[in-house]
Image (cartoon, rainbow, N blue to C red):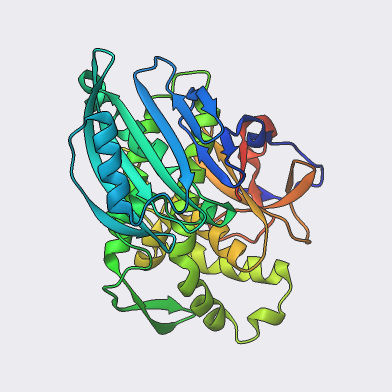
Amino acid sequence: MKYKILIILVFVVSAGLFAKELGFFETCSVYLPEGWAVLGSENDKVTFADPSQNAFLQIKRYSGDTYDNPGKIYSSVLSRLNGRGEGDSLNYETRASYFGNISFSLSGNTYKGFTVCIDGEDADYVILSFSLSGKYSDYHDFILSAMDSFTLDDAGRCSPGVVSQYYYPVPGPEKSIHYLDINGEEVLYTHDLNETEAAQVVVEREARIFSAYVNTRMVNEAWTRYYRILYRDNYRRLDRISRILAQHLDPGFTSLSDYEKSALLLSWIQKYEYYRTGTLSDVLSPISCLVQEKGDCDSRVLLYLILLKHYGIDGILMVSSVYSHSIAGVNVEGKGARFPFSGVPYLVAETTDDVSIGLIDQSMADPSNWLGIHFP
């Protein structure tokens, strides 16, 4: 492939224009599937619905001294709705919580879905995500994804969602010994493989949701949400391994410039085996990409950007349906092709070919064919 350094600055479509992350209750937020909107809002309750109003997400806040434990909150929800369900406890973001299914009738309609009850010191929360019973199979992924997008605060925007943490806790408790090939050295680390399974469940669920928007005018927004959900679900999973990796990439890693760190990490990821899953997503989760040392452009770019963020380096993902490819943009000094995004000129980084940072295949240099995506 022929590469060249682009001297002129070119522009990427700004995905930030399409963000649908909605804040409420001072610190909380949700990042709903495209087309969902606020149906109703009160001081301590907000309800969202899909465009056809077949599926809903409702979040209710109570004073922190209202209930003694999350199990009692769940029982209260069932009682108030005259509903049926069962569930189990979990620890969500250090808070005692309860996850359960629920079915109930209201105004002549029957509904089915899930509820999460969170017991906090200052506030308790009830999250209901449900659909008409007759539409449940159609909306199953959507109501789980909507619930999973909930965050209590800014820190939660870089942690797996409550559904993902119910599926398997983070960090995983059943760690086993693994090795990473770093500059020819077999570096030992421990990891719970159940976490990679949990992360892949999110990848496939979100791919099914994204597929519903492929031929719609909201495809760019849906694409943005897809990558941001995957980024969020994997960021915290890579906390510990990011530190181990830095220590072995270069003994003086912390003293390197941001450009040197970015180039060194890029070179390491470029050595991965090219791999696609063959599933609907065709994408390995970033944590699986690292553990298995293989992945396609999407897996590698997400992994690269998450690790860079751990090292305090800002970056964007650039994806193109025209080129069927994704690359990274890094906010560092250095020579090479740059894609300005929200006023910042990002240096390009190709993760699947052995080329230096700043180089891009000249056949992929048309800025109008790239969508830029930034992360928290």
Asked whether 203 or 141 is in front, the reply is 141
Taking 193 as reference, is 266 left or right?
A: right
Give the image quarter of residue 209: top left
Asked whether 316 or 100 is in front, the reply is 100
Residue at the spot x=66%, y=59% of the render?
A: 357
Residue at the spot x=44%, y=53% of the render?
A: 233
Residue 235: x and y, percent?
Answer: 49, 59
Taking 138 as reference, is 297 left or right?
A: right
* Count of picture labels: 0
Q: Is residue 43 visible?
A: yes
Asked whether 160 or 210 is in front, the reply is 160
Residue 104: x and y, percent?
Answer: 22, 27
Give the image quarter of residue 132: top left
Q: Is residue 278 visible?
A: no
Q: Is residue 353 above or below residue 104?
A: below
Taking 320 as reference, is 74 left or right?
A: left
Q: Is residue 7 above or below residue 255?
A: above
- Looking at this view, name the residue that lies furthest to the bottom: 251
Residue at the spot x=31%, y=30% of the render?
A: 130
Q: Is residue 104 above or below residue 11?
A: above
Residue 145: x and y, percent?
Answer: 38, 38
Residue 354: x and y, percent?
Answer: 55, 61
Residue at the spot x=69%, y=36% of the render?
A: 12
